[in-house]
């Protein structure tokens, strides 16, 4: 059972206080987008083995959504950060790259 | 008729579970939920004024004598006051924000939650049976507050003193929460951990 | 015979006697005994039958690793099967029964399996499927079923009468194991200032050291333990809990501890078990080591026991399993048992040491006592049925030709020790092979890691492969220091206490005894006692191609019993690797999975049983419903009245009465469960336009509008009436089950996508009690209450007003889900019960009738209104339900709009909503399929529609239904054939119903009843 620190309120929350929200940093495609773009937005997910960027909500807590960089193999948490950020902050990237040199945010 | 002639009743009707550790329904309490920018004096000023106390820090409570402010989220406070007052106070506060052009949401939520008071020795042990949150004195000293869950429902735990805690939970599960806390208080009353 | 010795037994109180019964026979014991030691003291060697062959089995071990001595404990609501006698602390009045035997332990019919054992080889359970079916059904299955299974389940009607609880603890350092290594590691960490929790699975502290001897800083281990416990208890930041097993180590330092509080003292107030849910910064596993059995023929005959267990019984309980004992060993530690037995006055008739040169100093000590040691020898076979009678000795490195028959009544076997690495391994810790000790030990290079990516488990002492007292103590100090450092404490120089014991000669790995044992011997050499897996079985599995250890495990069931292979694991791996001709580390181990030993369902459940099994959400009027015949229906976690039955009424009669009364006069529905979410802010209108398919920003203040919400993939997820409260404020009603997830959905978009939009939401569902006042007399009732103008002119359909109604602060919404004149009135929840009572009181003159969810459903179906969860199932779009009118064409975007433009969403072949009237007036089953000609690729009947809701309409006097049908709206008047619940394609005439497609709006289509 994971623990994640909510960046919005500072609490260290147990997994049973959190609600998962799937992959982070999806770019929304609405009306006018091509079938391929929309399909990608709606269905195609990384499901990577290794570092993953995820959405979590501090549901039994402050109620805020946040993002977490986590390793799906080792469960290491590289950091949590604001849901408003378009990509992980530098310090999180640095921690990921310390384990996975050259790692890039998936396109 | 302009004002109700009926008595408000909480779902627990003032129930008490006695023992070395008691659990009781605190009875109807006035509560106002306020959402806004906690860093904007235009928002915090009127809230503070109404509560008669300073803004609480993160996951803290401030105020006393039944007029208190609880930090519920980075953009939400819960104002406690005598039952009945919010009926006028909430729309008045909302109107003031609207007039000043302050983006905020104010709502009377007096009937939405119940307050359960857990009092006695080993109060922390009773809470620790039900919540995954760290309720040790170091993590949750008197004056602090944490929203978490007790067993299967959402709850806010507020530590008033080493012998007293308040549990706020939704009205519909008041009976469940009361039985939970009563059971946790009765089970192994001598068990001391903290 | 197996008996109590004249002296000894550090755990038992000889001054006092207690009684217990085993299979109905009453016996004596002392306080401090385990059930196993007490049975042995009473010469009960035979305690159970094995799982597959029903072979007679006796106690093999003295702790959690015991595979054989499983019993049923207690009676009635406290009966529990499969309890280990070795870890069951005895109390006066305990009742135990043997299991896996029928009709009795002595005369067991299942033992015929043993005679058939040649026909029950590895993979038996898979291979039997090849046998003719009938052969099984009539001949073997009835007998096998009777004889199969391990233990029996408690009576299905019995309810556990004990209580259980959870306890959440957050600590810096958790130490699992209260032996000398655990005590020392805990002391070091705590003295450095860390918050330490120390748990020990047994009732005793100090582990094996007091039995195994040696000295610690010149003291006996027992004295050192006593002194250390006193030191620990003086530390305010350390807490120790006995009878608490470390059951599981999981991600991010989450550990489950299983504390047994009252098993040894029934009648004590308080919970029976406590499940500790521990979050630890560092976990020290000082879980010791377990001795390995030796794999010789007849190693399962009662009286054959681990050497260490025999030593435990002698030293701890003053009990000997035999009077004439043979020791067979491949290492020096076994000699400690021979010495202990000799010292207790038990005749050690022979030591068979497989090592060609025998052992070291311990052997010399034994020989000095005049006991004969045969080096290079081992056991070919043990004979005896329900008790050891003879050991047939042989050359250890031979085929098993018998050299000598040695009469004896017990055999102590020692195959070396294996560290208990379970907890290290649960969360990914890897192992390395230790050649010298012939065991797997934690690999410090590959530890389990925590949230910070750093090691979170530190093994200590024997659990880390440090089997000598001196090394174990030094290792424990290192573990304690490391743990303290890792949780941010400072640690100075610490000198480990000095452990001293007799030096041991090297062990000689010995996996099959004798090494070249003939097949008939290997057929009787057991690896896994509980699952009856023999050396021959594993060899067969290897020959049949099960080369992966995980496959071989499943094929043979090695290590899959309740003991999880604590004794069998390494021996089984060694046999497999030997057969495959590979080194043990190349073959590897199977995965260790939690829990370490089985834990009770009660402990897992904790408080969640009976009325606390699940939270039950109650409305403010719940008590009234309960007192007035409510038949409950769960909706989400709420309970809502399905109907209110009056005396003498059936459910159907009550529903029909409620509907007719409402349509004819006046009904009341408790609608408090409907979700209510306030949405406010300068961008609230824009936000709601994105959220709903229709336009909400244009809704005038004072008005209500029905709205649909779709998920981003276009499917309908919720519906409800939206109310504009003020210029920048809306109130969104959701379905009963939808309030929480719709609120979460709103916050998701506001926080993650449109975070610059200025909108606040609040889920105020529970602030209000809401009552639907429905029927032709609805208005007159509200007028009687007084205080608000609810006339047609002042409060037309789809408007709302706020005021005081009969003295209650109220919001009145003129909306209808029944087609009748209807008002929904919201009052503060604390006044809800009072308001409901007032409506009943004042409505009596119109025979006001409270109605439940079923009447609500029927009335909405009569009007063709859809219900989320009935007409929708996560694959239905609004267009399927002819709700295109509620989808804005003007809006550039809303959630789900792009998805609804996908090709398959616009497919004209999508099934569409219609109404149905049954041809014979009957009621179609919900979910019934409309049959179409022909069959599909799977040979199933083709379908062309399905019933989404179906009811008897008392208003119309016939069965009505809603259905999604291919081309439905274009097929009005057409009759279709629907399946019934017992549909049989071979007999369609009797198992189908006919129904005609009609408009879904079956009642008052022009809406006249509401327009008053
Ligand atoms: Zn938070």
Image: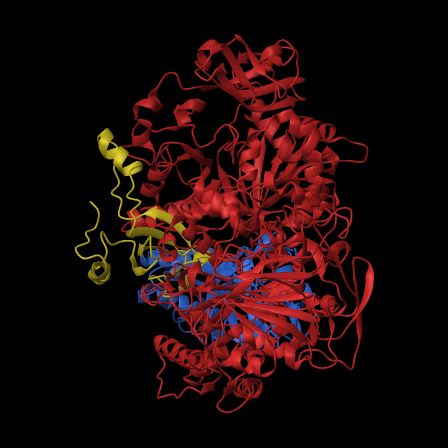
Where in the figure is residue C817, as x and y percent of width and height? 55, 31
Kindly give the residue lying farthest to the left in the view shown. Answer: A102
Viewer-proximal residue, C431 or C844?
Answer: C431
Residue B103, quarter of picture? bottom left
Q: Residue C872 in the image: x percent, y percent?
A: 48, 30
Q: Residue at x 52, y 81 (%)?
A: C364
Towards the viewer: C807 or A88: A88
Where residue B187 sits, quadrant-wise, is: bottom right
User: Which residue occupies the extreme front position in the image?
Assistant: C403
Query: Is the residue C421 above or below the residue C828 in the image?
Result: below
Q: Is residue C820 visible?
A: no
- What is chain B's hue in the picture? blue
**What chain is colored yellow?**
A
Chain C display color: red
- Toward the viewer: B67 or C974? C974
Quadrant of the frame with the C terminus of chain C: top right
The picture places residue C855, in percent across and down from the top left corner, at: 64, 30
Q: Nearer the viewer, residue C664 or C538?
A: C538
Residue drawn 44% across the image and 85% down it: C191
Q: Is residue C31 above or below residue C559?
A: below
Vertical placement of residue A89 versus C813, above or below: below
């Amino acid at each position: 059972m994971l623990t994640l620190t909510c960046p919005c309120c500072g609490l260290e929350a147990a997994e049973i206080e959190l609600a998962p929200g799937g992959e982070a940093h999806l770019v929304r495609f609405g009306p006018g987008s091509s079938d391929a773009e929309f399909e990608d937005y709606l269905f195609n997910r990384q499901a990577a083995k290794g570092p993953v960027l995820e959405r979590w909500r501090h549901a039994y807590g402050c109620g805020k959504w946040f993002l977490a960089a986590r390793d799906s193999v080792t469960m290491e948490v590289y950091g949590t950060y604001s849901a408003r950020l378009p990509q992980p902050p530098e310090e999180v990237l640095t921690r990921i790259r310390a384990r996975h040199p050259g790692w890039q945010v998936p396109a | 008729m302009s004002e109700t002639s009926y008595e408000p009743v909480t779902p627990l009707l003032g129930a008490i579970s006695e023992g070395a550790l008691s659990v009781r329904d605190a009875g109807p309490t006035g509560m106002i939920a306020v959402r806004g920018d906690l860093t904007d004096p235009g928002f915090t000023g009127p809230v503070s004024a109404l509560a008669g106390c300073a803004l609480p820090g993160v996951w803290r409570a401030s105020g006393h004598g039944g007029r208190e402010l609880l930090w519920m989220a980075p953009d939400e406070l819960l104002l406690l006051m005598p039952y009945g007052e919010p009926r006028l106070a909430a729309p008045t506060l909302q109107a003031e924000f609207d007039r000043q052009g302050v983006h905020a949401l104010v709502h009377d939520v007096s009937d939405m939650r119940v307050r359960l008071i857990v009092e006695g020795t080993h109060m922390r042990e009773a809470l620790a049976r039900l919540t995954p949150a760290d309720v040790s004195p170091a993590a949750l000293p008197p004056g602090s507050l944490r929203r978490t869950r007790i067993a299967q429902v959402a709850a806010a735990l507020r530590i008033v003193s080493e012998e007293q805690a308040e549990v706020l939970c939704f009205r519909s599960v008041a009976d469940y929460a009361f039985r939970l806390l009563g059971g946790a208080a009765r089970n192994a009353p001598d068990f001391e951990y903290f | 015979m197996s008996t109590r010795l004249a002296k000894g037994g550090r755990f038992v109180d000889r001054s006092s006697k207690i009684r217990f019964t085993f299979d109905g026979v009453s016996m004596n014991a002392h306080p401090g005994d385990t059930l196993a030691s007490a049975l042995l003291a009473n010469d009960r060697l035979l305690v159970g039958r094995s799982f597959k062959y029903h072979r007679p089995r006796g106690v093999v071990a003295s702790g959690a690793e015991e595979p054989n001595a499983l019993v049923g404990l207690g009676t009635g609501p406290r009966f529990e099967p499969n309890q280990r006698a070795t870890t069951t602390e005895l109390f006066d009045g305990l009742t135990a029964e043997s299991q896996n035997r029928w009709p009795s332990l002595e005369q067991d019919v299942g033992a015929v399996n043993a005679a058939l054992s040649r026909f029950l080889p590895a993979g038996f359970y898979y291979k039997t499927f090849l046998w003719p079916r009938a052969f099984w059904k009539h001949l073997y299955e009835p007998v096998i079923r009777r004889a199969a299974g391990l233990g029996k389940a408690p009576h299905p009607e019995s309810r556990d009468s004990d209580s259980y609880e959870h306890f959440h603890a957050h600590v810096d350092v958790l130490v699992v194991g209260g032996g000398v290594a655990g005590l020392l590691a805990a002391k070091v960490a705590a003295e450095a200032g860390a918050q330490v929790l120390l748990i020990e699975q047994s009732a005793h502290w100090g582990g094996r050291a007091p039995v195994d001897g040696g000295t610690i800083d010149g003291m006996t281990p027992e004295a050192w333990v006593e002194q250390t416990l006193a030191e620990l208890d003086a530390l305010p930041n350390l807490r120790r809990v006995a009878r608490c097993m470390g059951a599981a180590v999981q991600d991010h330092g989450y550990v489950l501890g299983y504390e047994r509080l009252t098993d040894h003292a029934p009648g004590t107030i308080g919970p029976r078990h406590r499940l500790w849910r521990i979050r630890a910064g560092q976990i020290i596993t000082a879980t010791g080591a377990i001795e390995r059995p030796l794999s010789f023929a007849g190693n399962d005959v009662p009286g054959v026991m681990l050497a260490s267990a025999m030593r435990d019984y002698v030293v701890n309980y003053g009990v000997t399993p035999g009077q004439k004992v043979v020791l067979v060993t491949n290492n020096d530690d076994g000699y400690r048992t021979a010495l202990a037995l000799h010292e207790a006055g038990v005749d050690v008739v022979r030591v068979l040491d497989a090592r060609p040169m025998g052992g070291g100093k311990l052997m010399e000590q034994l020989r000095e006592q005049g006991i004969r040691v045969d080096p290079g020898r081992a056991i070919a076979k043990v004979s005896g049925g329900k008790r050891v009678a003879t050991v047939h000795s042989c050359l250890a490195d031979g085929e098993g030709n018998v050299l000598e028959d040695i009469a004896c009544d017990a055999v102590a076997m020692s195959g070396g020790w294996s560290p208990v690495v379970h907890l290290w391994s649960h969360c990914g810790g890897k192992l390395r092979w230790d050649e010298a000790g012939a065991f797997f030990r934690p690999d410090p290079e590959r530890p389990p890691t925590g949230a910070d990516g750093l090691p979170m488990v530190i093994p200590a002492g024997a659990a880390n492969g440090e089997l000598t007292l001196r090394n174990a103590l030094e290792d424990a100090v290192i573990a304690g220091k490391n743990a303290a450092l890792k949780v941010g404490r400072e640690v100075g120089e610490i000198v480990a206490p000095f452990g001293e014991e007799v030096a041991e000669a090297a062990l000689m790995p010995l996996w099959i005894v004798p090494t070249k044992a003939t097949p008939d011997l290997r057929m009787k050499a057991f690896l896994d006692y509980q699952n009856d897996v023999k050396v021959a079985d594993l060899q067969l599995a290897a020959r049949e191609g099960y080369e992966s250890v995980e496959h071989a495990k499943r094929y043979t069931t090695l290590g899959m019993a309740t003991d999880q292979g604590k004794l069998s694991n390494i021996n089984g791996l060694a046999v497999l690797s030997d057969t495959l001709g590979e080194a043990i580390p190349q073959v590897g181990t199977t995965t260790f999975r939690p829990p370490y030993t089985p834990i009770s369902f009660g402990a897992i459940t904790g408080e969640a049983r009976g009325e606390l099994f699940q939270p039950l959400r109650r409305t403010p009027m719940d008590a009234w419903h309960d007192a007035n015949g409510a038949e409950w229906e769960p909706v989400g976690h709420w309970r809502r009245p399905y109907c209110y039955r009056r005396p003498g009424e059936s459910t159907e009669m009550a529903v029909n009465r409620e509907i007719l009364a409402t349509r004819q006069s006046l009904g009341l529905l408790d609608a408090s469960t409907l979700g209510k979410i306030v949405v406010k802010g300068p961008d609230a209108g824009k936000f709601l336009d994105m959220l709903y398919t229709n336009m909400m920003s244009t809704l005038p203040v004072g008005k209500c509008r029905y709205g649909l919400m779709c998920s981003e993939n276009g499917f309908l997820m919720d519906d409800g009436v939206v109310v504009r409260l003020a210029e920048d404020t809306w109130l969104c009603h959701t379905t009963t089950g939808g309030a929480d997830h719709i609120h979460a959905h709103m916050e998701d978009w506001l926080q993650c996508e449109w975070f610059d939009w200025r909108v606040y939401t609040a889920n105020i569902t529970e602030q209000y009690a809401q009552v639907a006042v429905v029927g032709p007399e609805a208005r007159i009732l509200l007028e009687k209450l007084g205080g608000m103008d609810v006339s047609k002119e002042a409060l037309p359909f789809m408007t709302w007003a706020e005021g005081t109604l009969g003295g209650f602060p109220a919001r009145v919404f003129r909306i209808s889900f029944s087609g009748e004149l209807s008002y929904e009135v919201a009052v503060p929840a604390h006044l809800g019960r009072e308001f409901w009572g007032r409506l009943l009181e004042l409505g009596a003159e119109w025979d006001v009738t409270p109605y439940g969810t079923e009447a609500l459903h029927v009335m909405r179906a009569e009007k063709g209104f859809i219900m989320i969860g009935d007409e929708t199932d996560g694959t239905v779009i609004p267009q399927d339900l002819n709700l295109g009118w509620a989808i804005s064409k003007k809006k550039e975007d809303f959630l789900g709009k792009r998805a609804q433009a996908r090709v398959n969403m616009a497919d004209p072949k999508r099934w569409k909503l219609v109404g149905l009237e049954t041809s014979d007036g009957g009621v179609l089953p919900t979910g019934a399929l409309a049959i179409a000609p022909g069959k599909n690729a799977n040979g199933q009947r083709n379908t062309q529609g399905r019933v989404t809701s179906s009811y008897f309409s008392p208003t119309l006097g016939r069965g009505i239904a809603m259905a999604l049908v291919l081309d439905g709206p274009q097929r009005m008047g057409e009759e279709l054939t629907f399946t019934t619940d017992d549909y049989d394609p071979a007999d369609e005439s009797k198992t189908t119903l006919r129904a005609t497609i009609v408009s879904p709006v079956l009642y008052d289509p022009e809406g006249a009843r509401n327009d008053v």
